[in-house]
Image: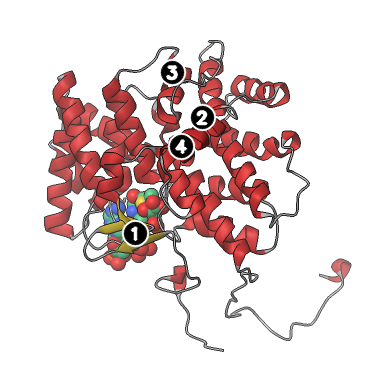
Amino acid sequence: MSDDLKKGLEGVLVAESELSFIDGDEGRLVYRGYDIEDLARDASYEEVLYLLWHGRLPNRDELDEFSESMATAREIDDGVMATVRELAAADEEPMAALRTVVSQLSAYDDDAAADPTDEAANLRKGRRITAKIPTILAAFVRVRNGDEPVAPREDLDHATNFLYMLNGEVPDDVLAETFDMALVLHADHGLNASTFTSMVISSTLADLHSAIPGGIGALSGSLHGGANQDVMEALLELDDSGKDPVEWVEDRLDAGERVPGFGHRVYNVKDPRAKILSEKSEALGEAAGTPQWHDYSVAIEEYLTEEKGLAPNVDFYSASTYYQMGIPIDIYTPIFVMSRVGGWVAHVLEQYEDNRLIRPRARYVGPMDEEFVPVDER
Ligand SMILES: CC(=O)SCCNC(=O)CCNC(=O)[C@H](O)C(C)(C)COP(=O)(O)OP(=O)(O)OC[C@H]1O[C@@H](n2cnc3c(N)ncnc32)[C@H](O)[C@@H]1OP(=O)(O)O
Ligand SMILES: O=C([O-])CC(=O)C(=O)O
């Protein structure tokens, strides 16, 4: 047993996985052998889900059948909708609402009582959870805005249907394709903290409905998925301040604050997903006549890369992309969930396939040999 302490488990190898490969020095991300640039350009989110869950890309018939099975699983039960309404009325945080409601889905899932390691049942459960998350999120946003939820449409793909349910109108092709691409980009990323959380939960032989809310909780933090919301709030703060982006970022660093959307445990260079999203953010800004968001971002990136050796991660350019798509800022991280749930399900399936309880240890540095004194004598 080694006594080397690896704080934050940095660089510690804890599993073998066939799902995603990351080269942190080259800035390369691969899902099951396919480069992220190719998938972002040519594959739909449904194709990527199939790839992650079934081990290979589907043919046309398989994709049609899979997409249909996703589309027909979108509706949520009345009890679930009642919780959505209650949480919206209580002004719950969107990530907390999603965590609560996804947990509740087990009460209505036909496979809830199945053996937690039953692969066929887990594929059905994973599909239902993934299909229902957009319905839950869109309904939550509409209800809190005083609108009625919009029922899902089975003839629309996953990305288009979400924007339709959110806004009550079918998005144009640019918005739908950009959103689908964002879902593809966020679907998996090795043993990031939320995926590892889901794996730890499933390693106890707890079920998928326990592992996914755990992943949502872990993703919500500002060091992980929560950073995309922080990025947009920072860009708006910069805009309001009237400062030059470099001056603003210097002030922030001088105040001892981190810049959200920069730095990464694995990448030492620009995150390949940030490269793709940066192009999208720029194109949306040009089309809408709002180039400032991309311009600010580029100025911050240039300064932090050159002066501090910090490169942008996926959250940096997704923020201005979503903002220019008119998506409310506090659902950027829930949108990350909408995509990453695919990766969580895939890693949980892998974990069950060759399970061993995940249980590291801590070096004890507390006191020893204390004399116990009864409570009334202390
Ligand atoms: C989808 C995702 O989860 S991507 C990550 C999203 N999170 C963020 O964008 C939040 C901002 N970034 C960070 O806080 C970090 O870079 C993390 C959490 C992503 C990675 O953390 P770690 O691998 O533990 O790196 P660590 O925190 O040790 O940072 C290393 C050094 O870089 C600095 N640093 C890292 N990120 C930043 C940042 N965003 N702003 C300013 N300084 C930073 C740290 O201060 C530290 O410097 P020091 O050694 O002088 O103290
Ligand atoms: O890999 C990580 O640590 C964080 C990340 O970029 C992701 O989860 O997409």
Lower sequence index among marks 4 and 3: 4
Residue in the picture at 46% in, 51% down: 52
Amino acid type of the residue that numbered disc 2 sits on in the rendered structure: Pro
Left or right of 53, for residue 80 = right
Lower sequence index among marks 1 and 4: 1
Crowdedness of circle 4 by 10 Å Cα count: few (<14), some, many (20+)? few
Between 137 and 132, the one nearer to me in the picture: 132
Residue in the picture at 59% in, 44% down: 126
| Residue named by callout 1 | 33
Give the Cα separation between the discs numbered 3 and 2.
Answer: 10 Å
Mark count? 4
Lower sequence index among marks 2 and 1: 1
Lower sequence index among marks 3 and 1: 1
Give the Cα separation between the discs numbered 1 and 4.
Answer: 22 Å
| Residue named by callout 3 | 164
- Evaluate whether residue 290 shows in this view: yes
Crowdedness of circle 3 by 10 Å Cα count: few (<14), some, many (20+)? many
| Residue named by callout 4 | 61
Which quadrant does ligand 2 occupy? bottom left
Residue at the bottom extreme of this rendering:
1
